[in-house]
Image (tube, rainbow, N blue to C red):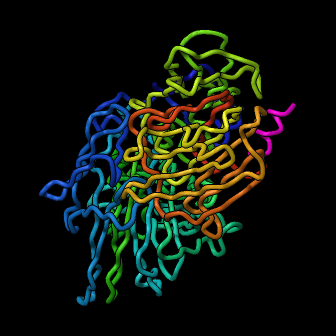
Amino acid sequence: MRHVTCRAIPLLLTTVLGGLFHRAPAQGKPEDGWFEIQGDYGSTILSNGNVQSPGPSGLTQSLFRQAYAGRLWEHWTDQAYMGARSYKVRVLPNWSGVNDRSEQMMMTGWDIGPASPHGDTMYFTFAVWFETPPPETETSSLIFSQLWQDARLNPFLYFSIGQGYLRVQARGDALRGDGIHKNVWTDLLDPVQNSGKTMPLQPRHWYRFMFRVTPGRGLLAPGSATVWLMENETGAWRVIADVHGVPMSWTTAVARDDPRTPAQLWTDFLAGKVPLADRRHATWKLGSYRMPMNATTRLYVDNISWANNNWNLITKNRTVGYHRHIVHLGFGEYWGSTAADSSGDSNGGWSYANHGQLVGPSHSWFTGAVGNCLYFDGVNDYVKVPIAGSEDEFDTGNYLSLSTWLSTDDAKQTGSGLITIDEYSTTYKARLYLVSHDTVQLAVRHPDDTRSYISVRAPYSLADGSWHHVAGTYNRFAPADKRLKLYVDGVLLGEEVGVDKPVWRGNNFLYVGKFSGNYFHGRLDEVRMCNFELAADQVRSQVAVGRR
């Protein structure tokens, strides 16, 4: 069940992202314009240090080459942004007084030359977690990512951390009063949002970034860059840099060790003596490169991806960093064996098409809390939504919300499943269900098989034949560590700390009206799964709609 595009993307979204929406590159090899690597779900570290990815979403596997001077990649299970493990990058203390390198080189020779159908814009994203405090001095700053053109010419984009701050810097050629200056540095972070064009970072916190970079072509050709930071508490992107016309370009044949003065270079440029060789091939390095320092540096990286001119691949069908209903079954049908999914963006005209399949002989439709609803007989009626083929959409990572309307007069049912991701007590990934006629539970399973629970007792029976709204949310990065919340009829009845781990991705079905052998008896309406934490006012809005 793949993402389906029906109409143009909304003007607002197009404007926010600079209008850079293009046809997706041909699926297949990394040089086709896309790659992804995650610590979880099948990536393999080969004996030579290369990392092999299985290629999510039906793409063939991708190979990521080990850096020429770096340490081998390592899987690590103590920390993961999503899934069960991440990659550990380690640099040991360096006493030699020279620059210390430990670079994990992701890709070389990107196809961004003049014959490339992809254009010059690059999107990439990754999550990073610093185990140890950032370096204290500017001279010991840790460059943890960079775009490097080739071994002879300069990198044109740096991401470094030093003195407790993040810096994003572009480097290129600029025309000043006395001529052309090479290697001009420009800080990109927004000075209004970030004091001194830097952003404070804390150790032992996950930070996820997304970048759009368009270098200029040739000497003095300006470039542009946009940097997003995912706000952990909300799981939504925030722009922290959006700059245009900065010195950042594919370097010409002018080498960084060229002896010409700025005035001589300008004169030769006007005289046509500066060759504009096309060298648009780049390497993205993600790891570490630092000035001398006598301390071990450790960081973890996870959920790394890159694409030529295709933001949609980086955000996984508009799920990553964007609040979406992944499944929304309104049960508005009057007949048939399919419950239509209306998730996605109705204004944009696209849907995730995660339709449900009705199973059992007794399904029937009645007037519900909102429009129609579906009746479940409590014996063998349920609805299942296939996850296979849509794993990216169901990989909600650090956030999840499940909600539904229910109506039942069966006060004897216990353990009845309302919404379950995968089935059975040993395999489920998340479940919202009735413990008894007045008690609801949300349970979330994590990739290391630990679990987070919250149960609440309503001040009245939910088996009174009336309509009641139930919503459960999980937010790994919630303030005050209140990761789990449960609402009944729009009222927050309980909060729990839970476990500081991501949600384990489902791989089978999302079930409605069933958990293991316990079937719900009654009516369900407006079944929703979201990839973000529903806020209290959003829960109340769902309740208000159902009570009109």
Q: Which residue occupies the foreground of this view, 465 or 292?
A: 465
Give residue 542's position: percent from left, percent from top. 76, 39
Quadrant containing the C terminus is top right
Dominant SS type (magenta): helix
Count of labels shown? 0
Q: Indicate whether residue 547 is drawn in magenta.
A: yes
Q: Compared to 467, does 38 lie above or below?
A: below
Apparent side of residue 74 relative to residue 177 in the rendered image (left or right): left
Residue at the outermost left position: 47
Evaluate whether residue 379 shows in this view.
yes
Q: Which residue occupies the foreground of this view, 211 or 351?
A: 351
Determine the image quadrant of residue 95.
bottom left
- Residue at the image position 46 percent from the left and 44 percent from the top: 395
Quadrant containing the N terminus is top left
The span shown in magenta is 538-548
Give residue 349's position: percent from left, percent from top. 64, 23
Apparent side of residue 407 relative to residue 433 in the rendered image (left or right): right
